[in-house]
Image (cartoon, grey):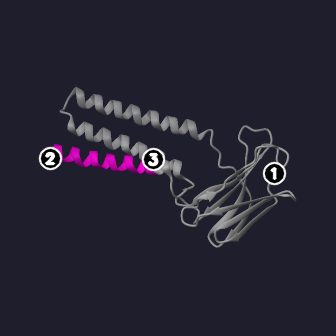
C-alpha cells in the first residue's frame, strides 16, 4: 500500500508540474524569463514522472528500464535547451526611460544579422525572475534606433523613430499586454 500511495503522490506532483509548464508556455503575465520556467518545469515533470513509474514498477528489469528511459529523456531535454539557448540573445540595452517601476527600453539585437536590429520593450517589476517584458516596436536590420520614448499616461506609450514616425500602443498594467505591437515592414517610411 505505501508504494501505491507514493506513486499517486509523485504522479500528482508530476501532473501539477506539467500544468505549471503549460501555464509558463502560455505566459499570460509576459514574464521576461518564462522560457527558463518552462524548461525547468518540463525537466521537473520528467523527473517526477520517472520517479512515479519507477516506484510503481516492481523491482528488476522494468524499474531499471523506466529509470534509464527517464534519464535519457531528461538528458536529451537539457541538451535541447542548451542547444536552443545558443541561438537566443538577450540583446544590449541602448536607452531606457522609467516611469515608476515600468521602463521603456531600446534593445539592440542582431545575432546573425550584419547590421544591428533595434526593438523597444516595456518592462515592469524589479529585475529578477518575475520581471515582466513585452514587445512594443520591432525594427528591421539597418533601420536606425528609435529616437524618442514616452509614457503618455499610465496605459499608453509612444515610440518615435525619426521626425515623422510615431507609434502609439496601449499597455495593460497588470499583464503588460501591448496592443498594437508595431513591426516595421519596410526599410523606408513608417
Seen in the image, is 80 located left or right of residue 118?
left
Q: Is residue 122 magenta?
A: no
Q: Secondary structure at mark 1?
A: loop
Badge 1 is on which residue?
190
Q: Residue reaching furthest left?
A: 1
Examine the residues drawn in magenta and state their main secondary structure.
helix
10 in relation to 103, above or below? above
Mark closer to the chain start, 1 or 2? 2
Q: Position of residue 28 (x, y in %)?
A: 50, 55
Residue 47: x %, y % from top left:
35, 42
Give the Cα distance between marks 3 and 2: 29 Å
Q: CA distance from mark 1 to mark 3?
A: 40 Å
The answer to whether marks 1 and 3 mark residues whose Cβ atoms lie closer than 8 Å is: no
Q: Is 126 placed above or below 58 here?
A: below
Farthest top residue? 61
In the figure, residue 107 lies in which quadrant?
bottom right
Q: What separation in Å lies between label 1 and label 2 (alpha carbons)?
A: 67 Å
Q: Which residues are magenta?
A: 1-23
Return the residue at label 3: 40
Q: Earlier in the sequence, mark 3 or mark 2?
A: 2
Which residue: 74% across, 67% down?
150
Residue at 65% across, 60% down: 122
**Between residues 118 and 168, which one lies in front from this camera angle?**
168
Left or right side of 165 for 128: left
Amino acid at each position: 500500500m505505501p508504494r501505491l500511495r507514493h506513486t499517486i503522490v509523485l504522479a500528482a506532483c508530476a501532473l501539477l508540474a506539467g500544468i505549471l509548464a503549460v501555464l509558463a508556455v502560455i505566459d499570460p503575465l509576459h514574464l521576461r524569463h518564462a522560457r527558463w520556467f518552462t524548461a525547468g518545469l518540463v525537466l521537473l515533470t520528467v523527473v517526477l514522472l520517472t520517479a512515479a513509474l519507477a516506484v510503481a514498477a516492481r523491482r528488476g528489469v522494468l524499474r531499471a528500464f523506466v529509470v534509464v528511459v527517464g534519464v535519457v529523456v531528461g538528458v536529451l531535454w537539457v541538451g535541447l535547451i542548451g542547444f536552443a539557448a545558443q541561438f537566443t540573445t538577450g540583446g544590449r540595452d541602448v536607452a531606457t526611460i522609467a516611469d515608476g517601476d515600468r521602463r521603456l527600453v531600446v534593445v539592440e539585437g542582431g545575432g546573425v544579422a550584419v547590421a544591428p536590429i533595434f526593438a523597444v520593450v516595456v518592462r515592469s517589476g524589479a529585475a529578477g525572475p518575475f520581471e515582466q517584458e513585452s514587445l512594443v516596436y520591432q525594427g528591421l536590420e539597418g533601420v536606425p534606433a528609435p529616437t524618442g520614448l514616452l509614457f503618455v499616461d499610465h496605459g499608453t506609450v509612444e515610440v518615435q523613430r525619426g521626425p515623422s514616425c510615431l507609434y502609439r500602443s496601449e499597455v495593460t498594467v497588470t499583464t503588460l499586454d501591448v496592443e498594437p505591437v508595431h513591426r516595421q515592414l519596410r526599410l523606408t517610411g513608417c
